[in-house]
Image (tube, grey):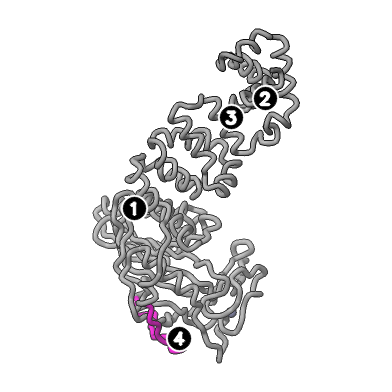
Amino acid sequence: MRIGLEVHLQLPTRSKLFCSCPTNGDAPNTSVCPTCLGLPGSKPVLNRKALELGIMIAKFLDCRINDRIWFSRKTYFYPDLPKHFQITQYESPVGNDGHYEHEGKRIGIWRVHIEEDPGRIKRVGRSGEEVSLIDYNRSGIPLVEIVTAPDLESPEQARAFIDQLVTELRYLVGINVQDETSVRVDANLSIGEERVEVKNVQGLKNLERALRYEATRQTKVLDAGKRIVRETRRYDEERKITLPAREKEFEEDYGYIGEPDLGEYHIGQWARETVLKETPFARAERMSAELDIPRQTARQVVLTSGSLADLLEKLCKEVPSEKALQWLLGPISSNWGALEKVIDADGGACVIDIVKADASGSITDSEAKIRLQKCAGVKSEGTPACASNPDMISMVNSFLDAHPEVVKDLRNNAKAANSVIGHVMKETKGQYSSKDIVECVKKEISKRV
Ligand SMILES: [Zn+2]
């Protein structure tokens, strides 16, 4: 089975691709102007940010960036497109011939280009009395289209591939996929010789279902000794089946011509100077290799939070990675809500000291946990120094009053303090560290001498 995908994602810009209308229009047909409505005399102006994001994505996918790019008019007639052509890229996309590593498999990326979204048609009313409503707020929204080679081998793999890609692009350029249905995909699938395209599938769940249905359908046709017809189908979400859509349109039907109002852009230099952030899956791969930790664990940490991953890298410089992970996945993760702010402020110094002390054996497990909670500020209000802690002072003093032999012993033997420490810890249910109690005991003893 061979599956190729054309994935459409909205680029996160404040304004549309060729005009200054905001992209967050709410009430239908309020975020529109002569340009995105395609009124005569209006002229498009390219949104620089959208092009920049397109370059970043193409570069991330290891594409060859075309130095000279331009836009084309793709002509078709449909109510979602008032000017009868969509401005897209045809002969000169931002990038070609890239690839992306997914679960150890190299997926070819044929092209990455940017284009405008048409308007949105919504059908309302009962069957037979349907009315079509149209919203041009979508018209001119910037999209990136990523076209893969037919290198995917199952519907599950196709879904997982897009899922991972979207996660990467969210970190890389801030692509905001609010819910999984905002990913739109055209997919082609072939079991035998001929391929069938399933157009405009909304969301990853539907994509997987549509591809599964299509794989079963084609297998049955071939098993019956018939031939697969090359065609375009659509996915019916209600009935969960694919249906023939229309005769396959060939590229020449669209009558592509260069968009004369936009001209050419030279982006080679710009692309070379663009520096990309490290994405989560790339980071997990690197950490797994450098720190010698399982890949799945590295991913889990990186996807939880960038600060958690930073902390793991720092801890691994100080203690063996096994110890670091034991702490990170245990007590640190369970206090993460409170610790994250502290770690962002002190660079993790407080936590790293504790883990180091634990690894060297200089403090006990329970002491380490108490100190960690103090770091997180969980008990910080209840744990000031001895001087300002009347409860602890009176507890220590009443114990010393009741055990004069301990006071005597303490003058010669520091270990005699253990009984006081044990008593206070038990009374306060481990609220204070032994260090704090010892400090308090010393102070109170010195007053008695
Ligand atoms: Zn506009």
Crowding near pointer 1: few (<14 within 10 Å), some, many (20+)? some
Please identify the quadrant where the C terminus is shown: top right
Evaluate whether residue 300 shows in this view.
no
Q: Nearer the viewer, mark 3 or mark 4?
A: 3
Q: In which quarter of the view is residue 366 placed?
A: top right
Crowding near pointer 4: few (<14 within 10 Å), some, many (20+)? some
Evaluate whether residue 377 shows in this view.
yes
Q: Nearer the viewer, residue 241 or 115?
A: 115
Sequence order check, earlier mark of 2 and 1: 1
Q: Quadrant of ligand 1?
A: bottom right
Q: In which quarter of the view is residue 57 placed?
A: bottom left
Sequence order check, earlier mark of 1 and 4: 1
Instruction: Check disc 3 and report the residue beneath it.
Output: 370
Instruction: Check disc 2 and report the residue beneath it.
Output: 443
What residue is shown at x 51% (from left), y 34% (from top)? Answer: 354
Q: Nearer the viewer, mark 2 or mark 1?
A: 2
Q: Secondary structure at mark 3?
A: helix
Which numbered circle lies on residue 102? 1
Quote the CA–CA distance across marks 1 and 3.
Answer: 42 Å
Crowding near pointer 2: few (<14 within 10 Å), some, many (20+)? some
Sequence order check, earlier mark of 2 and 4: 4
Span highlighted in magenta in the image: 251-267
Q: Nearer the viewer, residue 21 or 393?
A: 393
